[in-house]
Image (cartoon, coloured by chain):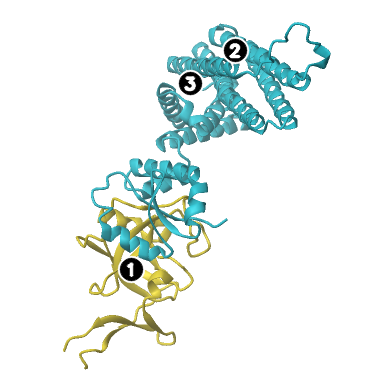
Amino acid sequence: MSQNAPLIKEYASFHHEKSVPLLQIHIGDTEQQATKVCDGILDTGSPCTLVPLSIISALNLKNPLSCNRDLTPKAIGGRNISSLAYYVRASFDNLTFFNTKIWACSDQDLEGLAIIGRNIINRYHICFDGPNKKFLIKTNHFILD
Amino acid sequence: MEALLEYSSAIIKNAQSASSSTLFEVKGFREKLQKTWSRPKPQGFGENPARSKHKDRSKSVELQEEIDLELNHYAKILNELEDTKAGFLDIAEQYKKAREIIFHITSLYTELSRVYREEKKFELASKSIVNGEYILELEKRLSYGNRLNYGAYLLIEFARDSNDNSSSLSETRISETAAAYKVFYEVLDEYYCFLHDELIESLYSGATEIIKVISSIDYFSNFNLDRQYSESIEALKNSCQLIISIISRNGFSEEQAKIISLYPNKETYDWTLRQRTLWSDSLPELIAGYSGKYVLFEDGEVLDSDEDEETLLERIWASGYTKERINKGVFVDKVKGN
């Protein structure tokens, strides 16, 4: 394999009920001291990424991103849920990280799953293989022989 | 049931303190008003009153004087409410009078504002509206005192009845107790921030005690319980549970309590609320200087701005701004255009 070929990671995991792509997302503080991992579903219908509060609490993030009103994005099912933004670093492969804004919501509201929205999805080339319940993610990380 | 009498007296004390703190505010307000009165200039000798230019102005002075008289009347009633040893019905009558006066003063302020607008004194006109709104706020404060008194009255009746009768929850008074606790729940829900800690503690332990008593009732051996009694017991239990949950959330609504739980601590939440107030106050300057941009805002000042949110966030975190920030968030929002 060429040294400059981008890594294409194949995932073969779909959520058992929702039939949507399921994968692990690594969330860390921007100081690069701690990282936590949780399962998340790719949701192209969501403009932002929602993460269970237990992950954020475990990272002990001290400075939320406040704004002029409480934001209550709609979760799956159209229900409005309470949320608060934090600035974190995130990664699918625990190798290539990027900084981004995510929204912490109660674990109960998210049923323990992160909802990975377009603010993260749009950073990648993702290929869906629906019939085979597989998807491929091309990352910017390069494989070394 | 001696404890119930104690709760009732704590509740009445709190209701009285509602009157005394309102009285204090009214006195201060009246003094402030008197200082800013626009009195007509004294007429000079030989001046024909019929030719006075102050004909319209005297209407506003008349209104101001009427407001002052009514405020004085209101203060007298509050004074009586504070000292009174009268029964509940007399107290309720006083509250009713006080409310009527407040509504009258509010309508006088509306009229005063109209007169000022006709005179093109727009600043005074808006000041009159503000004063009218302030007076209405005072009514709200007094209203919770009235409602607490009503609840306490119902409870005292119940406690007296329980002393005469050894049964823990008598049929005759249970509906009054249920009504009293419904009143207490509504007061807690609406006026939590005005209430004294002592009262909140009393209501909490009262509700806990009542739930304990209700739970010990053996419904199976009391199958003759009539429907109304059972419904009152259920209503009482429901109000007590609501009281316990609202106090456990420190007076916040379920939604607010959920939002606060997302913050690292309560101090950071309070900091955010302060920034929101400052943001609203600074909105004209923000729109003038940063319309359509994302800004980093703190204590009334814009520390950085950018058209792109991600770029701004990247810069904020790279600058070290977030280092050593204790009990504070990072306040970033988009300034909406005109």
Crowding near the residue tagged with mark 1, few <14, some 14–19, many ≥20 C-alpha atoms within 10 Å: some
The residue most toward the left is: A145
In front of the other: A115 or A112: A115
Look at 49% across and 42% down and name the residue there: B281
Q: Which chain is yellow?
A: A
Residue under numbered circle 1? A39
Q: Secondary structure at mark 2?
A: helix
Viewer-nearest of discs 1 and 3: 1
Q: Earlier in the sequence, mark 2 or mark 3?
A: 2
Look at 39% across and 55% down and name the residue there: A106
Do the residues at pointers 1 and 3 share their chain?
no
| Image height of A82 relative to B13, above or below | below
Horizontal and vertical percent position of residue B120: 71, 32
In front of the other: A3 or B97: A3
| Image height of B184 relative to A76, above or below | above
Q: Which mark is residue B10?
A: none
Do the residues at pointers 2 and 1 share their chain?
no
Look at 20% across and 90% down and name the residue there: A3
Determine the chain carrying the residue at label 1.
A
Determine the chain carrying the residue at label 2.
B
Amino acid type of the residue tagged 1 in the rendering: Asp
Q: Secondary structure at mark 1?
A: strand
Q: Which chain is cyan?
A: B
Residue under numbered circle 2? B75
Amino acid type of the residue tagged 2 in the rendering: Ala
- Residue B89 shows in this picture: no
Determine the chain carrying the residue at label 3.
B
Q: Quadrant of the C terminus of chain A?
A: bottom left
- Residue B271 shows in this picture: yes
* Distance Cα–Cα, label 1 vs label 3: 54 Å
The residue most toward the front is: B46
Viewer-nearest of discs 2 and 3: 2
